[in-house]
């Protein structure tokens, strides 16, 4: 598994943070810069020894003239060269010099880079405890500086350490943090480097499909950018995935692809990974001689160039291979080397120390987040206090405005309701006036037309009486009786249609006279008036009178009653009207839906804003109860009521 720590640039390049001493001539600082530039050119040309020579000259001169910027540049680049040359202890010494100057000058950014470089050397030397301690210090400083570029690098390096410690959860956690930070930076190179490490963490966590997708994306980036080492890194990890999923043919195929891409310019550790992958693939395909061929090619260089953690895994592969080839002595020797490295790197104390440092780092992050939250809350409270007066004022104005708006709305609604009620009253009054006008017209036509004709017929009959013989007297009497009856009926209908008595003498006398007039042989109608009915508006009294007419006419037509009562009473401003009979009764649930008379009675009552109730049974006849609030229609509100009175109808007399 190709770890990012063997792929990425290892050092942090500093910014010009220090001012040169006035005692140092400008030419000396230029010389330091020239030495570093020459060393860089030599290194790019593959002349490592020459590059080292010029780096050392630049470092010595920078130290001599106290050119801090130049010295930081020297330590960063020279320690990187030493790391690539696998001279980890020398690189560690240079990184420690870088850290000492960073702390002395309080350059936190350079100190973070120095801690990271020190951690890389310890990681390569197999001292995981010190590596973890320095990685966490570097990460903590980058968090303080809000430096996402170096945060990504330190997240990735810390994840690589947890991969070697076989800590699945933490390796994946920090790998994802590094990848998420790279995405925010929108830097394709950093995204690709983070993907390499994320793929390794996913392999450790058996997330092979995700790791395969990540590795192939790394290969695609390498092709797009022309970076052959990036392509090889992806190929090595794809081959490793297929080895772990026991797809050995595919693993061999991808290792062969990598082998074909090896050229003299490729860093030496890449042929080691490819050769080791070929040995492992052939071993699992049980082609042990081919596996041994590649193992012999790789083991010598691996012991010189690989980190101890990577060398440990190769010893295990070699031990298993030698055992299959029955070379038990060599198998045992390789097994012992594997056990020694494994014990030294993965012992319990090392793991516990790293875990302790990591927990401290996480705790510091939480404390920092808590402090920031408290600061935000304090600022928020301060802002609230400043705005309290304005808020209270705004709320007061808003409440006042809402109250006024509500009052205006309620007044408007009340006026709308009053206007609507007035319109409805006007419409009702217009309709009722129309009805009464029509009744008056019909009454006049009956009285003046039919009534006049009947009177003329009666007079004509009286004139004919003298000329009749005895045999015709009986017919004459019968005809005259019929004319008298018809004349009386016309008179009654005329009175009912145009009850002038209501308008002239009031509601009480009108109802009393109506009951007397409507009483006939076989039906006795009693009228009771309880309390003094106040004088009401004439149109309202007329409507009440029509309701009584409708109810009594229903008794005449349908009830077959012998006795009936019409009772009118007043209680304060509530007018109660009760009409009862002892007739045959009816089913109210059916008749209320089909009877026109009852519908008219109910409709008139509701039009006046009254309540309507009817009860009926075969044993007790029918009772209609009506109730009206007459307060709006009283002509003289101060009128007092009098004691109970009762008017009893006399026997029906012909008129």
Image: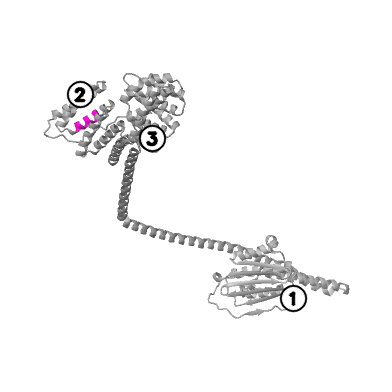
Q: Residues under labels 1 and 3: Cα distance?
A: 126 Å
Q: Position of residue 123 (x, y in %)?
A: 31, 33
In terms of depth relative to the viewer, which is nearer, 132 or 38?
132
Instruction: Say if 394 sits above or below 219 in the image.
Output: below
Tell me whether circle 3 and circle 2 mark residues in contact (CB < 8 Å). no
Which numbered disc flags the more N-terminal residue, 1 or 3?
3
Q: Taking the image as drawn, is residue 346 in sight?
A: yes
Name the residue that disc number 2 marks. 53
In terms of depth relative to the viewer, which is nearer, 515 or 33?
33
Which numbered disc flags the more N-terminal residue, 2 or 1?
2
The secondary element bearing badge 3 is classed as: loop
Residue 498 bears which disc, if any? none
Q: Residues under labels 3 and 2: Cα distance?
A: 40 Å
Q: Position of residue 383 (x, y in %)?
A: 31, 52
Residue 654 bears which disc, if any? 1
Query: Dividing the image into 4 quarters, which one contains the C terminus?
Result: bottom right
Q: Residues under labels 2 and 1: Cα distance?
A: 152 Å
Q: In the rendered structure, which segment of residues is drawn in magenta?
A: 69-78
Main SS of residues in magenta: helix
Give the residue at the far front of this rendering: 329
Q: Is residue 471 left or right of residue 536?
A: right
The secondary element bearing badge 1 is classed as: loop
């Amino acid at each position: 598994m190709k770890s990012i720590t063997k792929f990425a640039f290892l050092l942090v390049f500093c910014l010009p943070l220090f001012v040169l001493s006035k005692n140092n001539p400008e030419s000396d600082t230029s010389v330091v810069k020239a030495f570093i530039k020459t060393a860089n050119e030599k290194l790019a040309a593959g002349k490592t020894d020459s590059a080292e020579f010029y780096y050392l000259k630049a470092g010595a001169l920078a130290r001599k003239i106290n050119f801090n910027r130049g010295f930081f540049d020297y330590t960063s680049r020279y320690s990187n060269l030493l790391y690539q040359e696998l001279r980890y202890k020398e690189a560690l010494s240079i990184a420690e010099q870088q850290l000492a100057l960073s702390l002395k000058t309080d350059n936190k950014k350079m100190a973070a880079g120095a801690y990271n470089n020190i951690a890389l050397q310890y990681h390569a030397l197999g001292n995981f405890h010190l590596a973890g301690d320095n990685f966490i210090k570097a990460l903590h400083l980058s968090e303080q500086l809000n430096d996402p570029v170096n945060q990504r690098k330190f997240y990735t390096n810390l994840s690589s350490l947890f991969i070697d410690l076989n800590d699945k959860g933490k390796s994946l956690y920090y790998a994802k943090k590094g990848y998420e930070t790279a995405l925010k930076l929108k830097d394709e190179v950093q995204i690709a480097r983070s993907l390499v490490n994320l793929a390794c963490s996913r392999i450790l966590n058996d997330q092979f499909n995700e790791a395969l997708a990540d590795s192939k994306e790394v290969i695609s980036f390498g092709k797009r950018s022309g970076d052959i080492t990036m392509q090889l890194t992806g190929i090595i990890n794809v081959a490793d995935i297929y080895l772990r999923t026991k797809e050995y043919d595919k693993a061999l195929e991808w290792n062969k692809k990598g082998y074909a891409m090896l050229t003299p310019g490729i860093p030496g550790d890449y042929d080691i990974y490819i050769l080791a992958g070929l040995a492992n693939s052939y071993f699992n395909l049980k082609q042990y001689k081919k596996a041994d061929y590649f193992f012999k090619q790789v083991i010598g260089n691996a012991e010189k160039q690989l980190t101890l953690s990577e060398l440990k895994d190769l010893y295990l592969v070699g031990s298993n291979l030698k055992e299959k080839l029955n070379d038990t002595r060599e198998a045992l020797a390789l097994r012992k080397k594997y056990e020694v490295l494994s014990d030294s790197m993965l012992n319990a104390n090392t793991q516990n120390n790293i875990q302790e440092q990591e927990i401290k780092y996480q705790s510091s992050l939480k404390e920092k987040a808590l402090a920031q939250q408290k600061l935000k809350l304090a600022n928020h409270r301060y802002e609230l206090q400043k705005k309290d007066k304005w808020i209270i004022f705004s709320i007061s104005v808003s409440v006042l405005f809402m109250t006024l708006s509500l009052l205006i709305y309620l007044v408007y609604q009340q006026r709308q309701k009053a206007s609507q009620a007035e319109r409805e009253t006007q419409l009702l009054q217009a309709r009722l006036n129309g009805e009464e006008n029509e009744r008056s017209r019909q009454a006049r036509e009956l009285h003046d037309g039919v009534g006049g004709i009947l009177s003329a017929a009666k007079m004509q009959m009286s004139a004919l009486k003298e000329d009749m013989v005895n045999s015709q007297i009986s017919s004459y009497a019968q005809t005259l009786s019929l004319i008298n009856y018809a004349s009386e009926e016309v008179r009654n209908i005329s009175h009912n249609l145009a009850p002038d008595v209501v308008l002239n003498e009031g509601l009480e006398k009108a109802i009393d006279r109506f009951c007397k007039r409507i009483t006939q042989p076989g039906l006795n109608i009693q009228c009771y008036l309880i309390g003094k009915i106040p004088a009401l508006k004439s149109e309202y009294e007329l409507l009440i009178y029509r309701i009584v007419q409708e109810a009594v006419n229903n008794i005449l037509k349908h009830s077959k009653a012998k006795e009936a009562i019409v009772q009118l009473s007043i209680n304060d401003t509530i007018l109660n009207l009760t009409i009862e009979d002892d007739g045959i009764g009816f089913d109210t649930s059916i008749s209320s839906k089909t009877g026109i008379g009852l519908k008219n009675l109910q409709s008139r009552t509701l039009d006046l804003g009254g309540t309507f109730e009817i009860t009926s049974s075969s044993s007790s006849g029918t009772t209609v109860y009506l109730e009206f609030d007459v307060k709006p229609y009283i002509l003289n509100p101060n009128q007092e009521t009098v004691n109970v009175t009762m008017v009893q109808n006399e026997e029906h007399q012909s008129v």
